Image: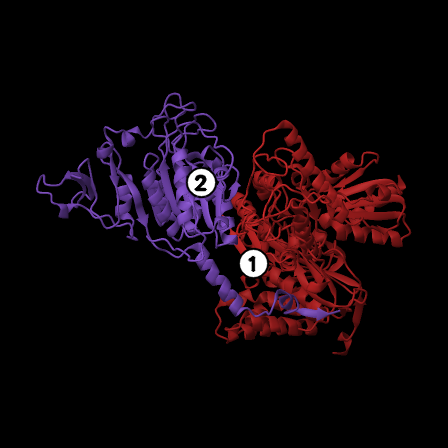
Amino acid sequence: MAQKTRVIELDQVVIKFAGDSGDGMQLTGTQFSETSAILGNDVSTFPDYPSEIRAPQGTIAGVSGFTVHIGHKEIFTSGDLADVLVAMNPAALKVNLKWIKRGSTIIVDFDNFTQRNYEKAGFKSDPFSDNSLVGYNVIKAPITSLTQKALEGMGLDNKTVIRSKNMFALGMLYWLFNKETNPSENYFKKKFKNKSILIDANTKVLKAGYNFAWNLQELNVSYKVLPVKTMPKGKYRNITGNVATAWGLIAAAEKCGLPLFLGSYPITPASEILHELSARQEFGVKAFQAEDEIAGICSAIGASFAGSLAVTTTSGPGLSLKSEAIGLAVMTELPLVIVNVQRGGPSTGLPTKTEQSDLMQALYGRNGEAPCIVMAASSSSDCFYYAFMAAKMSLEHMTPVILLTDGYLANGSEPLKIPKMSELPEIKTWLVSTDAKEYKPYLRDEDTLARNWAVPGMANLRHRVGGLEKQDIIGSVSHDPQNHQRMTDLRQEKVLRAIKDVPDVEVHGCQEGELLVVGWGGTYGALLTAINELCEEGKSIGLAHFNYIYPLPANVENVFSKFKKIIVCELNMGQFANFLRMQHQKFDYFQYNKVQGLPFMVFELKEKFIQMLKK
Amino acid sequence: MENIQNTDMPVLTKQDFVPDGEVKWCPGCGDYVVLSAVHGILPEIGKKKEDIVFVSGIGCSSRFPYYVHTYGFHGIHGRASAIASGVKIANPDLSVWQITGDGDCMAIGGNHFIHTVRRNIDMNIVILNNKIYGLTKGQASPTTPLGSQTKSSPEGTIEQPFRPGLLTVGARGHFFARVLDTNPKMIREALIAAENHKGTSVVEVLQNCVIFNNQVHAIVTNKETRDEHQIHLTHGEPMLFGANKEKGIYLNRKKMKLEQVVVGENGITINDIMVHDEKDLDYTVQLMIMRMHPPEMPLALGVIRNVDKASYNELLHNQMLNARKNSKYKSFEDMLFSGDVYNL
């Protein structure tokens, strides 16, 4: 097969796996990204699935997709448009045609491209014969029938056979990108530990796909994305944002020496944090699945009162339900981490899609003057760090902290450089000494204004806290007007003083010049990629991306004043821009907003920035 | 039930649990009687002062934690069960008490109440049931009798009231006692039994609101009729009542109904009187007892259901021990560096 030895090296490639929601595309994509990561690529993934578990087969509504971006250079997004599309049926092809590059390779399971399925997908005519795929490299692979053939005689029922066809597609992609099949074979061994027939079957299908691609005339070149060289040396693992969040919280609990308590209620896309922490009893984690969102946070407040590192996790609608209880945590000045994995809203909105539209709710969505520290993670892997830091800020300032992530970070994955516990910062608590003889609940540290913390079980320190306004220092119920003013001032000032622990916002790209791009949270990868590319083209553009939102870093004014124009980019209608207008009024803010349940595309950002630079 | 008395325990008195500061309930409020009973039993439950936590929601009765010198948490409306659950799960060594009212517990907190009972979290829920919203000045509550005229039901309520005991059993509860604010001794015994029971213990106190629902329990508490309208239950004893204990509860097997009978009349002997069994896992008869109501039948008071069942906290403790024992990892850090880890 001499003609098939041509290998083209690529810096990066974007592959999209798409099929019916029962076709196993999430698993196929995950396997491809895990293998690529293990073999040394930088990777970033983005699952995109419908909120129905099984929408009608073959329809547009039922298409589930998984995008994998792998790189020889460092990559920061899951990629705009795909270079390769695997489409298991006509609906998957129809939905994704607009998400792939002109000239890209399209691999279809041709067995499913029947008249009936064309109709279900809404194709008016056969796309292979009506010129709509001209210019694409289309591979019609009979994936289903070849899978059946590969497993003939193994005695498996047809349902099980069909279910493994995704591994045929995976095998084809492994050949196309010169990947080893070993990591997936090891995965089968682990996954089907007690069912050796399934190990054999999946391995067989995987290899059949690999060999099929190798023998296929139409695939006359293969590609190679070499291992990434520019990332810091060290041990890595591929991780999703939700698992990273869970692990960051465990790390914080271990670091501060308090047991971790989670009170949570299942909600998309935050449930995986609950799942992961529920599976970590071995490290002393108590995960309590409450009867509702309110009980989730209230149980966490109870656990915090009793001396745990307490956390509640949710998504937008759940944050709304928790509002009153967040106020209780503000009033009782107890440490509490509230993780909000943002999704499309309002109301039930778009449960499986990403958005950044809960910012104002996090900042202000409570009755009374109820300030909290608000932070945001900016990549799947840094969810680990910011979950850790949210716990640290909460404990060290004795106040609830809201950590915002989003569906894109939560479900997406990328390599995490695994930290040693000793490399993580220390976490201090305000727990009073167990031999203290007297206790005043609202006695504060002069520097941070954090109150001292006594918990049940400590002798001589019995006291009562609650949602009614309390007398400064001694903590008895008080309706005194001057005291209410003073306590309100103190709670506000305490949160503002956390600025001492907020690092300066860094500027990427140009440090001064024409256009400053401002972003926060999960849009970091797309914004960074866009401004990096424009900087390489010689444009005068920089990026200030925020992880600490309230309080804002101290150097904001200094950074903002170095650019002629500022554009705030976010996946909402301008919530951060409006917040900045309140906090830093002397600047003018342009906005770039998108509310489609989708992350930013690099190309659309670049277009906007170029247009801004021309103005 | 006997108390578990730890020999290293310092001797405590009622005064150890009475805080400084005044109690701000209306004069004559039934809550005072409960408060005094609580102060009285806390020295006897075998717990250190610092190992007791009172949690409440919102309402008159929910001010309770301010009036007991233990650790206390005055929460938000309806959420006391959830807060208390968090306290107990976080630190199972604590004795956790939720003090709540019929509005706080049965209306806004109804969901938390049934789920706490269902889980069998090891805590005591004391419901001060005055069948009215007191702190908001007199609206109908979920336990207000059908037809009652209140500020929010000037023409009379048109809703069926909850009966806390039935709700407890419906939520698969294993402990329920009903007591009166006019009988401190009975409150005391029920509270001690509740604390000794492992799992969620629900104690309903029929409590009088002198301002907004005065005499709501009069049919049970009136001097003239109380002997006829109350029956005090004791586990293992025949269910007798009346001024001279001449009456009893009889199970009519044909109708599968409880009836009140007079011992010595119509051929009824003491052997025909039902014997109270609070330990029966099958709640059928206990439910029938809970449903008795004057004037047809006397109201059952005392511990009606008290069945042993592993608590959430005990089961969680066992799971956690096993998880640690069976863990593949030496530590959390060990897990971080295990599995699909690669070098770059």
Residue under disc 2 on the same chain as residue under disc 1: no
Disc 2 to disc 1, C-alpha distance: 28 Å
The reply to whether residue A47 is in sight is no
The residue under label 1 is A285
The residue that disc 2 covers is B99
Q: Which chain is red?
A: A
Q: Which chain carries label 1?
A: A
Q: Which tag is nearer the camera, tag 2 or tag 1?
A: 2
Horizontal and vertical percent position of residue A263: 55, 50
- Quadrant containing the N terminus of chain A is bottom right
Residue B343 pos. (x, y %):
73, 70
| Image point (80%, 48%), residue name | A505
Q: Position of residue A307 (x, y in %)?
A: 57, 51
| Residue reaching furthest to the top | B154
Query: What label does residue A130 carry, if any?
Result: none
Does dot 1 land on a helix, a strand or a loop? loop
Q: Which residue is rendered at x = 86% and y = 40% of the image?
A: A565
Q: Which chain is purple?
A: B
Q: What residue type is labelled 1?
A: Val
Q: Which of A611 and B8 is in front in this view?
A: B8
Q: Mark 2 lies on which chain?
A: B
Q: What residue type is labelled 2?
A: Ile
Drawn side of residue A520 relative to residue A481, left or right? right
* Residue A232 vertical position relative to residue A93 in the rendered view, above or below: below
